[in-house]
Amino acid sequence: MDVLEAIRGRRSIRAFKSKKVTQETVEKLLDAASWAPSAGNIQPWEFIVVRKPEIKRALAEAALDQTFIEEAPVVIVVCANKNRSSQGYGIRGKTLYCLQDTAASIQNILLTAYSLGLGTCWIGAFREEEAREILKIPQGIRPVAIIPVGYPAETPPPRNRRPISQIVHYETF
Ligand SMILES: Cc1cc2nc3c(=O)[nH]c(=O)nc-3n(C[C@H](O)[C@H](O)[C@H](O)COP(=O)(O)O)c2cc1C
C-alpha cells in the first residue's frame, strides 16, 4: 500500500471482530515498529504483546474503562526505556527522545496494521502505575501506549483536520 494512502486512510478503531490475529501478523507489526527512527539509533522501545483475556481486561480498567480494549484479540503495549536513552543523552534522552522515538514506533504499528487490513487505536489515557503493576514493568521503563489490534468491526468517517494554513508558518513562527 502507498504510504500516503495508509496515512490518509487509517482511522482509530474502537470495535473489533473476534477473528484471530496470527502471531506472524503481530511480528510484522513489531518488525515495522523496530524500523522507526530513534535518536542515536538507541531504539529505546519495548513491546509487550498481550492475548490473555484477564490481562486485557485489567488493562481496559486501567485505561479508564475503555472496554473495547479487551475486545481486541491482541493488545500491544509500547514502552519507552528511559534508562537506555539517558545513557546516550542524559536528561534530554530520558524526558524527550525516548518518548519521541517510541511515538514513531507506535505510528509505524498503526500504519502497518492498516495496510494489513487491521484496526488499531492509540490509547494514551490510562493509569500508568496500574498498567505497570499489571504488566510487571520495571522502574525506568515507561508504558507509553496501549494499542488494541484486531479486524475492524466499524468504519468510522475521518475526523477533521486543522487546515494547513492554520498550522504552518514560513520562515518564523
Ligand atoms: C497520544 C494519544 C492518546 C490517545 N488516547 C486515546 C484514548 O485513550 N482513547 C481513545 O479512544 N483514543 C485515543 N487516541 C486516539 C485519538 O482520539 C484519535 O487519534 C484522534 O481523535 C484522531 O482520530 P483518527 O485517529 O481516527 O484520525 C489517542 C491518540 C493519541 C495520539
Image: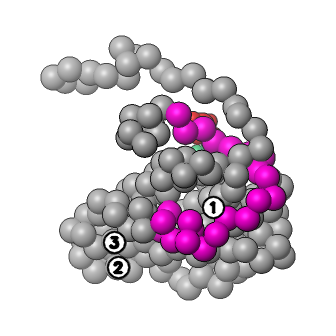
Mark 3: which amino acid? Gln
Mark 1: which amino acid? Ile
- Nearer the observer, 1 or 125: 1
**Local crowd at mark 1 within 10 Å, few (<14), some, or many (≥20)?**
many
**Residue lying at 48% horizontally and 21% vertically, measured from the top left:** 162
Is the residue at mark 1 in contact range of ligand 1, meaning its CB lies under 8 Å from it?
Answer: yes
Mark 1 = which residue?
A: 146
Label 3 – label 1 distance at C-alpha: 18 Å
Q: Which residues are magenta?
A: 9-30
- 152 part of magenta stretch: no
Point out the tag, 2 or 1, that comes first from the N-terminus: 2
In front of the other: label 2 or label 3?
A: 3
Quarter of the picture containing the C terminus is top left
Residue 21 percent across, percent down from the top left: 67, 64
Point out the tag, 3 or 1, that comes first from the N-terminus: 3
**Residue lying at 53% horizontally and 83% vertically, measured from the top left:** 139
Mark 2 = which residue?
A: 84
- Nearer the observer, 137 or 148: 148
Q: Secondary structure at mark 2?
A: helix
Mark 3 = which residue?
A: 43
Q: Secondary structure at mark 3?
A: loop
Do the residues under discs 2 and 3 have CB atoms within 8 angstroms?
yes
